[in-house]
Amino acid sequence: MIRIFKYIEELNCFVVDPGYKEIVHELGLAEWNEVVWIGRFFMLDNDYGEHWFDNWDLRDGLEVKAQETGYASEDLMILDPDRFINGKDGPCHDASQRLLFWTDVLKSLQLSLDTLVAEATRVNEKRRADGDDEYIPDLESRIRLIKEEQGQS
């Protein structure tokens, strides 16, 4: 299992785990950040989910403290509990409860290499079919190398 986020307690936010980040870049899953595709699953499997960390105003407020602790503010993944409501039949919880819940979820979030490979294969096949320049012709070789590195020959 591959951990997705690293929790930064003194900032009460996350950064993308370096090991996950490396794998995602090798597999071609990074978009404008490495967790865009995961956000789509969390947000009812639609493109709204790619914006689950669009909260630049919250990052600006942590910029000085982030630098003091060795992090770039643009790398911070800050949970905004209001992004996790749609107003259709609720909300059922207040913002502080949503923040606690989603913080716990992201602290424990791990995905299998199989899940990452399945998504990379799907995305790469779509890129091939669309004639996209980001198509990775050697994706299968990359997957084999990653599996070897992860001890999953």
Image (spheres, rainbow, N blue to C red):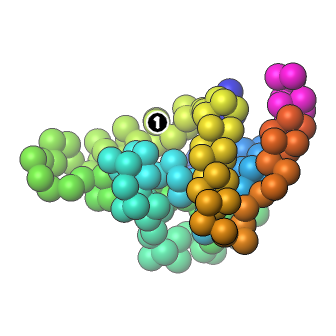
At 59% from the left and 56% from the top, the residue drawn is 126
Q: Quadrant of residue 135?
A: bottom right
Q: Which residues are magenta?
A: 146-153
Asked whether, in this view, residue 139 is left or right of residue 73, the answer is right
Relative depth, front residue between 141 and 6: 141
> Where on the picture, by quarter, is residue 92?
top left
x and y percentages locating residue 113 in the rendered image: 69, 32
Disc 1 marks which amino acid?
Val
Q: Is residue 120 left or right of residue 55?
A: right
* Quarter of the image that includes the C terminus: top right
Asked whether 79 or 61 is in front, the reply is: 79
Is 85 included in the stretch rendered in magenta? Answer: no
Residue 117 sits above or below residue 86 on the image: above
Q: How many marks?
A: 1
Query: Residue at the location (89% across, 32% down)?
Result: 149
Residue denoted by label 1: 105
Q: Quadrant of the N terminus?
A: top right
Identify the residue at the far left of this view: 89
Would you say 98 lies left or right of 16 here?
left
Q: Is residue 152 magenta?
A: yes
**Residue located 60% across and 66% down the image:** 130
Asked which secondary structure carries label 1, the reply is helix
Q: Is residue 3 visible?
A: no
Residue 75, percent from left and from top: 65, 65
Q: Tell me: residue 134, above or below residue 41.
A: below
Badge 1: few (under 14), some or many (20 or more) residues near its Cα, within 10 Å? few
Residue 77, position as x, y percentages in the image? 55, 58
Tell me if I can see residue 126 in this picture: yes
Q: Position of residue 27 (x, y in %)?
A: 75, 50
Residue at image coords 53%, 53%: 37
Write down the quadrant of residue 132 in the picture: bottom right
